[in-house]
Image (cartoon, helix red, strand yellow):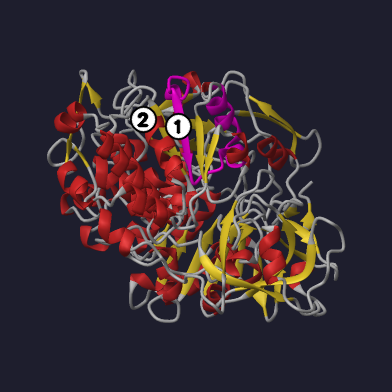
Amino acid sequence: MRCAVGCGHVQRGVDVGYGIDGVRGDSAHPVSRGLACSRGISESADPDGEWLTRPLVRRGDDLVPTTWDLALARVAEEFEAATASSPHGLAVLGSGQQTNEAAYALGKLARGGVGTRNYDANTTLCMASAVTAYYEAFGADAPPPTYDDVPEAERHVVWGANPAAAHPVLFRWIRESADDGGLIAVDPVRSATAGAADRHVAPDPGGDLALARAVLALIVARGDVDGAFVEGATENFRALRDSLPAPARAARAAGVDPADVRALADALDAPTLLYWGMGVNQSARGTDTCRALIDLCLATGNLGSGSGPFSLTGQANSMGARVCASKGTWPGHRTFGDPDERAVVADAWNVPAGRLPDDPGPGPVGIVEAVGDEVEAVWTVATNPVASLPDADRVEGRLEDAFLVVQDAFRSETAELADVVLPAATWGETSGTVMNMERTVSRVRPATGTPPGIRQDLEIVAAVARRIAPDALDPRPDPAALFDEFAALTAGTTADCSGIDYDRLDADRAVRWPAPAADAAGGYRYRVDGGWAFPTASGRARFSTAAGAAGDRALPDPADDAYPLTLTTARVAADYNTGVRGRSEETAANDADGRSVARARVHPETLAEHLPPGAEPPAEPHFHSHLCVESRRGSVPVTADPDPGVPVGVVWLPIHHPMTNRLTVAATDPRSDEPNYKQCAVRLVAAPAAPEGDPTARGWKRRRR
């Protein structure tokens, strides 16, 4: 499991010791049918990074080995002190890298055992804007289409996503379906997906909302709205229509040619799947832009077989975290603000309803900001906030002021700050289930044992619970029983998994929800007896009604005379998230001083105009060294690759380098709390000489075997 496509792998353990000896695609798995990407194979069989094999505790400046009993006793003592006056004194940051069972248990402990509102499951960093948009438009989370719709689509529009790098197996299916001129990529940068597309539309960074509104305005002006669908299955269209800008004006605001607007409008005149990813979600306008893309599907009747809005999820079990983890909703997408739903959860968990928070909390950025005020202790599980959160230097400073517990399989930048480190098993070593981006639940099983110092996430969560909330979890939880408990709590909800259990998964290998009975499985959502039924108050899908206000709201931290360039960030094919399993040459390179620095892509004209005095001339024809990218928050040494695929005035950096987020701004979407990762103002400056002991030169590589 390396991404949310949900490919099935067959893994073989080593004959002697611990570890994975071989990995291949599982030809019997109904999702991927034997396909697998090289990153999924290599990161399972041969991950880089420093494995954590024993609990560690801080002694002065050092992390030293200890026993599990001593580590857990220290954790319990500090967590109890942090929550002595308020349950919100403990913050918990989970991840889409846990199994459903571990995510459910962590949420149950945080929300029901402790009662903290300062809890997040990491999906706020990647999918919260899409989630919010789905709820506002359809009354429920998750994409309506499934992978079964990919071959049925006539056109494919990939907007603010690069599945050629991030989801290669899914992108293969898209290319096979779009083999006759049917693929358009929308991305400011010429990505691998854009390079494979039949047309590349390149809006300015932050111009996606204006572009989507331009396309809808043109569809309306040409009379291409699917009137029968709009009239019979939606509401709010007239208010949206009346607020639309002129197509040409919106195209100028987006930074695109009117011909690009026409091409997108033409594509939506046929059955079209409209995919989007982090380039849309990770913006202060993320929810509004997601809504605008859904509006395009609704206005053109692109809902049904071979069509519809399809957000591309990043982490392996991000969808599972959305359904199981009690982050933005209670299990099964039960609403936080509904007292009846809270009562159902409280009854199932046998806790007072008043203990459960009545709001989902402030999101990761808000949680970190609360350290030193409301929050005294922080527990991170399979996540690396020192590298992954925006304005990372400030995050590091805040976490240094908290009692920090890091639970992970690999040593990370966050682990370096920890007071206690709890070593956890990873994929191939753990048992449970996961959900992919199209709502399919699959089993995961261990192919190898682990050294005695390693425990599974679920075991660790239960061990902490025994000490701080003894009644929250079974002392030795069984994953199958815990899944049954979770599934029962989803009965009758829009994410009904009550018809799924381990026996069914063993027989069928994978089952898509909603699955309210043992013989039921989900397909295209909201289609009922040839018509449409949405879980909204009216039973109709809802157009957005904020076309003007969002587009008029300025993006945070725009370029100016002092910081004249715009930074954007994205993924590369070989690496994953913050790169603790390893960073490829696409992410990191050695500069003239031998430091491992981020690899920037910059248009040659931008380098020619903005290369600072004193910067090193190119040591090789293809890159510049002795450079820093600098924002109002931090400075990052880079090597700069001249790349005409990056727009003039833009600097591109990989999300996988741990220093990238020193530059990004901590502004968030006002409705989803998702950070604005994709745009901020920067400049190029000459790099100082590397100080002795520079942490960017650090290279971790130690194996468990």
**Secondary-structure class at tag 2:** loop
For the residues bearing labels 1 and 2, Cβ distance under 8 angstroms: yes
Looking at the image, is 509 positioned above or below residue 282?
A: above
Q: Amino acid at mark 2?
A: Trp
In which quadrant of the rendered image does the N terminus lie? top right
649 to the left or right of 278: right
631 to the left or right of 527: right
Q: Is residue 505 magenta?
A: no
Residue 273, picture quadrant: top left
Which residue is pictured at 31% across the width and 36% down the height?
Answer: 495
Q: What residue does disc 2 label?
A: 513
- Separation of residues labelled 1 and 2 (CA atoms): 8 Å
Residue 389: % across, % down = 52, 64
Between discs 1 and 2, the one toward the N terminus? 1
Bounds of the magenta segment:
147-176
Residues 529 and 43: in front is 529
Q: What residue does disc 1 label?
A: 441
* Residue 29 at least partly seen: yes
